[in-house]
Amino acid sequence: MIIYQVNNDILGTTDGLLFPIKEFRNKIKLFDKGKKRINQRNYEEILKLHIEEFGLETDNLGFYLNEHRQTVGSTIYVVNTLRRMQNLKEIEKDGKPQVYYVAHEVGVQLQEIIEGLEMAIPELRRFITTKSYFEHSGEFEIENKDINHTRLFNGNEEENVFKYRLLLILQECFAVMWISENYDSRIIDRDFVDDYFLYRFITIRMDSIIDSLINLKKFSISQFEELVNSTQGELSIALEEYMLYSFEKVSELRNTIHYDDMKNFYDYFIEDEVIVNMPEILNLNRMIFECIEGFLGISNIPSQY
């Protein structure tokens, strides 16, 4: 996202990028807005990749559970992201996985951007005289669980696509929870950059999560109603309050990922007034996570092996 926006908004061209990062950047989304058939096709493609890789009658879907046996991620999410790489044209030299070359290229270009900014604005260097750091506090317990696809995707096409999209939202919710509850609490000598990153990451991801839920409510009416009923209507009330008090503010912040606007995220962040009510947003995120996690009930689905 950063590499593309810097090249597009500030340098004025993305022609110098070594792989089609524009296409990759624009497709890292939870859903295709207003395009029901494309979401169906994406689900079918991801399921097909799992079956081709692991077989039809085996436990071909993978899930990650925390110490409370809550589902916090899945191979569905991973494949949804990494399958975009089939269009990337980087050269493989050492037989390493394709993601390695993408990660290497991203790291190189980000470092070039940082060095270019520091040369152009020497004052930036004074911010790195002291550094905050992250306190490691042991392993994060994760349990692997595999099931056959038919035990989860056992409804009609619309119901199956609904579950597929809930899995993508679920993992995004967990990322926000982990950043806010685990990562943030272990920062030592925190500084401006730490808080800036947390606010920026959380607002961007929350906008994506809510946007996807609103789209589900619009295009998967009966399934979404079933999801809401599983919380005795609490999810619907919480979303209505969010739409009333926070939606426009968070959306406005999310749109500051572009660098050609007069006012950027930094400008919002240094203002004296409160940007958004972060505790309320994080509480809503946890509610969404627990609602989806309980609705899918992955931990209760038996594995074959």
Image (spheres, grey):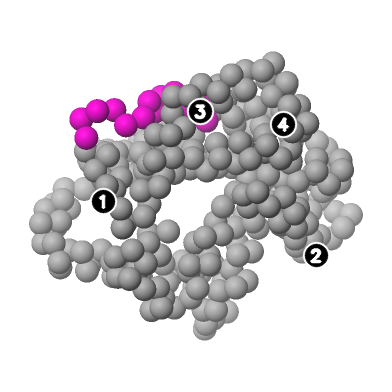
Which label's residue is closer to the chain start, 4 or 1?
4
At 59% across and 29% down in the image, what residue appears?
A: 288
Choose the circle earlier in sequence order: 3 or 4.
Answer: 4
Q: Please, is residue 78 above or below residue 12 in the view? A: above
* Residue occupying the point 53% across, 65% down: 24
Split into 4 quadrants, where in the image is the N terminus? bottom left
Q: Mark 3 points at which residue?
A: 243
The stretch of residues the image draws in magenta is 271-285
Q: Which amino acid does label 3 sit on?
A: Met
Mark positioned earlier in the residue sequence (1 or 2) = 2
- In the image, 126: left or right of 207? left
The image quadrant of residue 6 is: bottom left
Q: How crowded is mark 1: few (under 14 residues within 10 Å), some or many (20 or more)?
A: few
Q: Which mark, by number, is residue 52?
A: 2
- Going by the numbered disc 4, the residue's amino acid type is Phe
Most foreground residue, 131 or 149: 149
The residue furthest right is: 57
Q: Which amino acid does label 2 sit on?
A: Glu
Specify few, some or many for label 3: CA neighbours under 10 Å numbering under 14, 14-19, or 20 or more.
some
C-alpha span from label 1 to label 2: 49 Å
For marks 2 and 4, give the CA distance. 31 Å
Q: How crowded is mark 4: few (under 14 residues within 10 Å), some or many (20 or more)?
A: many
* 233 to 147, vertically: above or below: above
Q: Residues under labels 4 and 1: Cα distance? A: 38 Å
Q: Mark 1 points at which residue?
A: 262
- Residue holding disc 4: 224
Residue 196: x percent and y percent? Answer: 29, 42
Q: Which residue is drawn at 62% across and 18% down?
A: 234
Q: Closer to the camera, 51 or 13?
A: 13
Task: State the SS at label 4.
Answer: helix
| Callout 2 touching callout 4 (CB < 8 Å) | no
